[in-house]
Amino acid sequence: MIKEYLDNVRSYLKDLPTDEREELLQFYEEQMLDAGYSIQDIEEKYGTPKQFARSLKIEYFIENDEVADDTVPRSTRTKNRMNLVWLVVLGLFASPFLIPIAIGVIGILISAIILFLGILFSIYVGIIGVLAGGLIAFVNGVILLWQSVATGVFYIGAGLLLTGAVIFFAPIVWRVTRWLFEMLVTFIKWVGNRYLSKNNVKGAH
């Protein structure tokens, strides 16, 4: 019965690396056998195979994200994070038991995403605006040199100043952007650990 249960779990874990998936399932198989669990005990502790698989995937993506370093391709890490967000959202909406919590959490999540995108939009529109203003001022300064050297030099200087400011602050803006995104991912991890870990799967379907 345990093998059949874990085979069903395995069918929901196809998107995990084979070696890590099998190592994980072997660990739980040994744990269940050593504890002498019946199928009822297993479902009481871990939920249905689909529930258990979802919680394992959430924990897998959270743990891998926390240990990820520069050797992990950015595209792979981004894909894993998107999978994590999707799993958390699906897990919350799939559970009748968590629906009241899910409504609040999803509301916060949506608000956070909207706020995040709004801040990003404002920052980058501001950068583009300043850069465009600097370029326009520089071009106008060059044109005005033929009419008034002082005015032309002033506009050229203003254009270079604005362009230089964009170049100087661009790395800072990028770091702020990454920090905001990390805060959003941290929130997703907290939701996953708090409501959808393998110790909190009861009531989910």
Image: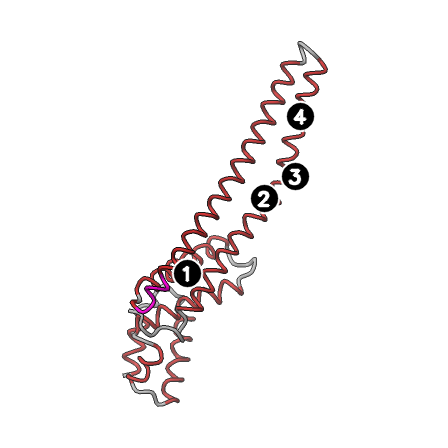
Dot 1: element? helix
Frontmost of labels 3 and 4 is 4
Which stretch appears magenta? 97-102
Type of the residue with mark 2: Val
Which percent across, then down, holds residue 10? Answer: 32, 72
Residue 100 within the segment the image draws in magenta: yes
- Which of marks 1 and 2 precedes in the sequence? 1
Frontmost of labels 1 and 4 is 4
The image shows residue 44, relative to residue 99, as above or below, that is below
Q: Which mark is residue 133?
A: none
- Which of marks 4 and 2 precedes in the sequence? 4
Residue 84 within the segment the image draws in magenta: no
- Which of marks 1 and 3 precedes in the sequence? 1
Type of the residue with mark 4: Ala
Residue with the mark numbered 1: 84
Q: Which mark is residue 173?
A: 2
Crowd rating for badge 1 (residues with CA inside 10 Å; few <14, some 14–19, many 20+): many
Label 3 – label 1 distance at C-alpha: 35 Å
Question: Which residue is at the front of the view, 168 or 19?
Answer: 168
